[in-house]
Amino acid sequence: MNAPVTGTEDLIYSVTDGIARITFNRPQARNALTFAMYEQMAAICETINGDRSIKALILTGAGDKAFASGTDISQFRAFKTAQDALDYEARIDRVLGTLETCRVPVIAAIAGACTGGGAGIAACCDIRMNSYRLMRMNCGFTV
């Protein structure tokens, strides 16, 4: 079963033949994540946990310069108190926990920079692989 592509411009979600894919789609910002992108990723993992037709999840970044460079630092401009920082850390812990406990194998298809929170995302995945290598393998995955 193939599901239509959904998501925002910044995060694209699709399912093809039981393989779910999340693409961080901000190549102009080295795929830095906004708070909304983190929340959307967590919601997708929860959806996958309830959909037995999905067999694996691939995370990848748009373009060839970065998988993900972490949180977009412009998101921190709204912080006014120490509690804002603590709330941010709690959010990231919750989101990464959701990714880490996703019921399907999660593959980080990494091309380019994988830094900061992007490295945290990759660390939560079951498999981390150079996306160029994944494309060369005859395993039915396309990145």
Image (tube, rainbow, N blue to C red):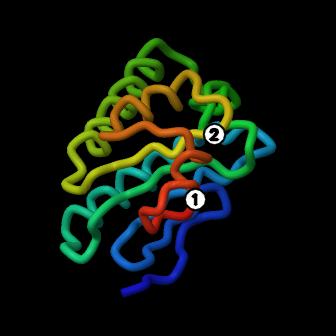
**Neighbour tally class for label 2: few under 14, some 14-19, many 20 plus, Cα within 10 Å:** many
In the rendered view, tell whether residue 27 sits above or below residue 52.
Answer: above
Asked if labels 1 and 2 touch by Cβ distance under 8 angstroms, the answer is: yes
Q: Nearer the viewer, residue 115 or 70?
A: 115
Binning the other alpha carbons within 10 Å of mark 1 as few (below 14), some (14 to 19) or many (20 upward) gives some
Quarter of the image that includes the C terminus: bottom right
Residue drawn at x 43%, y 37% is 128
Residue 99 image position (x, y, % from top left)? 31, 44
Left or right, 1 with reference to 12: left
Residue 123: which quarter of the image?
top left
- Residue 98 position within the rendered picture, expressed as x and y whole percent measured from the top left: 27, 44
- Residue ranking furthest to the right: 28
Q: Which residue is drawn at 21% across and 62% down?
A: 49
Identify the residue at the far bottom of this view: 1
Residue 143: which numbered mark, if any? Answer: 1
Give the label on residue 111, or none.
2
Number of on-image labels: 2
